[in-house]
Image: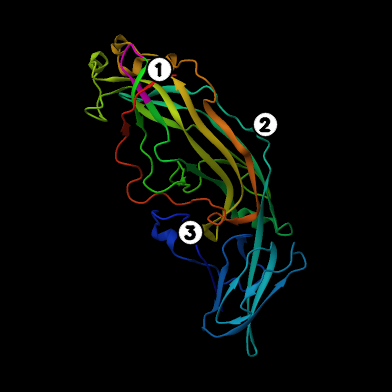
Amino acid sequence: MIIARIDPTPPLSPGRTIPPERGAPTTLRSATTPTTPVILLTGCLPVQLSLSTGQVAQWSVKAYPLSVSAPPVVAPANGAAVLLSTNAGGFFSVHAVVGLQTYDWFVRFIELEVIRPDPGGMETDGMPDMSPHRIGMVAVMAFFGCSARIRLRGSDEQPSCYNDVTPGILQDMFWIQDQTLYGAFCRRGTNQIKGYLFEPIPRAASPNIDAGDEEKFPFYDAKVEPENGPLRRVKFDDMPGIVIPVLYNPAIGFQKDFDPNWAKDPAYLLLRKVGGYVSFRSAVGAKCKQAPNTYVVGGAIQWNLIFNQRIKEIPPQAYDGGFFSIDFKDYLAVSTPPNGTVLGNPAVQIFPGPMDACAAGVETFGPEATKTTKQYQWHQRSGVLI
């Protein structure tokens, strides 16, 4: 019997948590008849083939007539352990010959094609929102939305095989140390900046997987319509931003509680601006039911979050009715663009062909241990609010 295994998509960079279920190769089904082939994606990592007996065999691959391309390659042609390339789409049979005995293994490679999205259909937001996040903290956020069409090929004569493919978004966030999102703080009644409070960032090096739904991890929460078939649309939206205190005392540092009397205390500085820059790459990819830890991507949408949002002074009496009674959006000042979400240049990237996510430069693992730095980082620098 032929034993087939495939490795999981590896981390792009060190310092990642690799759960046990995602760190080991997946053993694929024996698939000894053409009616029950293994379903894999074109461009995934090579398939590792060997015989259960451990014998050296002569290996070959045959393409069935309805295959959409030439057969993949087995290397070496003679050996006890070989690799099957995955650059061909269609229906194939692998044969291992030892003396007069022939062993068969059947596989169908399905090709993922990302149909180039129209940047005109991507929704950016030049008017950020500000709302209470928890007591003493506000969230300043901006919206981004997009959809991408995909086409699956390689199983038109057996379309039910397409249903083994799960499309999704693998979204990475990129940043530069000390140049991420921050709040600028001033003394009450002045436009003189006394310092900048930078948000906590992942300990691992950029990029970092940005996935808000643990059940779908590492896929970002997205909607796929229809759920089955060769033609589908992946829709997703995001509202990234920064959570930041409205009042800050550099001598004490970050505090988890809040006292409205701080607004009258000159030791506490006021949040007067949110600034900074982070970028996102939302890769359109897929995985197969039989290789759930191997991810293939076909293209990506590139966009940025740029904040240049000034904030009006919030008077001390505004807190008299309670922190959550304040309509913080009313304190957003007119700001100079770019401010909010903007498309990258280029906005759309189509890869030369479907490929493993790591090979395409897409991170699919979160940072190990503590997700972020322990604290907001205070940088005492003077400046003028602009």
Residue 182 to residue 91: above or below:
above
Q: Along the line of sight, which residue is nearer the eye, 209 or 101?
A: 209
Q: Mark 1 — residue?
A: 328
Q: Along the line of sight, which residue is nearer the eye, 251 or 103?
A: 251
Q: Mark 3 — residue?
A: 10
Q: Secondary structure at mark 1?
A: helix
Label 2 vs 1, first from the N-terminus: 2
Q: Which mark is residue 120?
A: 2
Say if residue 77 shows up in the picture. Answer: yes
In magenta, the rendered stretch is 184-190
The answer to which quarter of the image holds residue 258 is top left
Residue 220 to residue 20: above or below:
above
Name the residue located 30 percent from the left edge and 15 percent from the top edge. Answer: 322
Residue 323 drawn at (x, y percent): 31, 18
Residue 154 to residue 341: above or below:
below
Q: Can you say which quadrant of the picture contains the C terminus?
A: top left
Q: Secondary structure at mark 3?
A: loop
Q: CA distance from mark 2 to mark 1?
A: 31 Å
Q: CA distance from mark 3 to mark 1?
A: 43 Å
Residue 48 drawn at (x, y percent): 55, 71
- Classify residue 121 as left or right of residue 376: right
Residue 172 to residue 65: above or below:
above
Name the residue located 54 percent from the left edge and 40 percent from the top edge. Answer: 222
Q: Residue furthest right?
A: 65
